[in-house]
Image (cartoon, coloured by chain):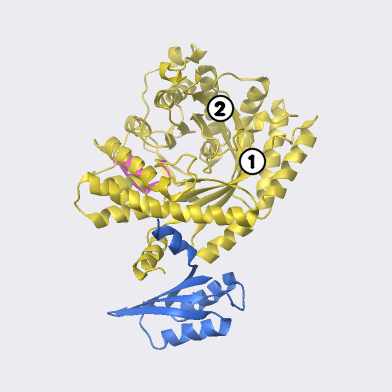
Chain colours: A blue, B yellow
Amino acid sequence: MKAVITVTGKDSKGIIAKVSAECFDKGANIIDISQSVLKDYFAMIMLVEIADLKIPFGDFVDTLKTLGENNGLFIQTMHEDIFNSMHKI
Amino acid sequence: MVNIHDILETVNMIREEHLDVRTITMGISLLDCGSSGADVTCGNIYDKITKYAENLVRVGEEIEKEYGIPIINKRVSVTPISLIGGLLTVDDYLKAAKALDRAADTLGVNFLGGFSALVHKGMTEKDTGLMCAIPEALATTNKVCSSVNVATTKAGINMDAVNICGNIIKKIAFLTRDNNSIGCAKFVVFANAPEDNPFMAGAFHGVGEGECVINVGVSGPGVVKSAIERTGNCDFSVLADTIKKTAFKVTRMGQLVAVEASKRLGVPFGIVDLSLAPTPAIGDSVAHILEAMGLEKCGTHGTTAALAMLNDAVKKGGSMASSHVGGLSGAFIPVSEDQGMIDAVSCGALSIDKLEAMTSVCSVGLDMIAIPGNTPAETIAAIIADEAAIGMINGKTTAVRLIPAYGKDIGDTVEFGGLLGYAPIIPVNKYSSCDFVLRGGRIPAPIHSLRN
């Protein structure tokens, strides 16, 4: 079971490290990362495996959202089904 | 494997373009609640609704969090209350309204629809009992929504019922006069009412439905508008195609939520209603979509054609995206709930006559329109008759949700608040329709209803 974590905001030091650490801590296994920096803005998309998540998925969503708020970022975590259903016939 | 472009597009739709699931509505049959007395019946009604829907709000919130899709409302709709055994007098139906309101409070849903009657061919004593109770029921409850179906393509128009509805609307406006006649926002008069509409105030659980069902209403006027703006100066074929593809994505999201909610609640999935439903928020307007298509102001010439194209493209794109599409499924044009509509009325670009023309090509009707408080009941009945005729002849749903704001006139604005928005008073034709509507009886069904 996979989820997609989207991180956007102003570029600052250690964003990837902080989000990865949180994923590791909660048992989410990172499968793929894509990121880009456009002028001052940072956008990262992580595909994570959540089958072995140590906490309920809803709590994981909240944890990352709070991490984002504490670092001036917007972090949205969504179950992959939403993307699979919207963009494929 | 999903690609980055799709992910960013989805996130942007939700964050910037107001993509959301407007409502998850659980439809519940109350046909087995009837008993020998009103008190027992009302107890059965309360118990059944609170039992079946007890997890609705919680599951809605869970899905919202896990999928990152805002689910704005969780609601309940029930069998038209006029049909439930054990209820006959006005007092009986008022008790039922109170039971429905208490159930809605217990569940934490924000509206409960179905205080309704189906009278397109004729009215029974039960129907008239409920209809007489409607004004006080809506004035003394918060969350109950009511509707009356006065016409169908097969039955014709019940003009006696139409006249009663004109009076009901006036009475509701009077009884809720201290609150901008807001009671009228909870009452809809229908022609060809759908049995599975998840949107309020006209939602009810039709008699052909099963025990319990989950229906979802999606919404994305902002998404459609942004998609149109990105295509720039293209021809109508490209425009229609863009709207179709966008409607596909929006409806797919609703399908996902509906199937998931159905699974978690253990209730069969009914339909996705793929309507474009605006809110007063900036960037969430259907009128602005029409203006993005090239009209200087919604309501000018070309508006009906634009809306026809929009409505049709939304249906074509959305129907591919869901296993079952139903409800109203088209573009909504509620005046007070759409900032673009409000502006168009305020500057004189949009009149009630143009709105009536628009209802012939889109899914709703004359919706959330504030008219002068001194509009006679017969004029309101005539407006209902016009809408019913459009619905009856064209084999589509039409509806009327008018607010004759008590004590207000042209130049005033009525403020409802929240998702119900605000509206400037629109003028109506001052010439009388009394002698016409008061003939009474039934306008016969059209010849093309004989399809066998």
Q: Is residue A51 visible?
A: yes
Q: Establish if B210 lies above or below B24.
A: above
Residue B250, x across and y down, in percent: 41, 53
Measured Cα–Cα span from mark 1 to mark 2: 16 Å
Query: Dividing the picture into quarters, in which one does residue B265 lie?
Result: bottom right
Residue B432, x across and y down, in percent: 40, 17
**Residue named by callout 2:** B168
The residue nearer to you, when weighing A4 against B233, is A4
Residue B342 lies within the magenta run: yes
Residue B58, x across and y down, in percent: 63, 59
User: On what subunit does the disc labeled 2 rest?
Assistant: B
Q: Which region is colored magenta?
A: B334-347
Looking at the picture, which amino acid does disc 2 mark? Ile
Residue B84 lies within the magenta run: no
Local secondary structure at mark 2: helix
Query: Dividing the picture into quarters, in which one does residue B365 lie?
Result: top left
User: On what subunit does the disc labeled 1 rest?
Assistant: B
Q: Establish if B259 lies above or below B331.
A: below
Disc 2 residue crowd, few under 14, some 14–19, many 20+, Cα 10 Å? many
Q: Locate residue B261 relative to residue B434 in the image: left or right.
A: right
Q: Which mark is residue B141?
A: 1
Q: Which mark is residue B20?
A: none
Local secondary structure at mark 1: loop
Q: Establish if B121 lies above or below B300.
A: above
The residue nearer to you, when weighing A28 against B333, is A28
Disc 1 residue crowd, few under 14, some 14–19, many 20+, Cα 10 Å? some
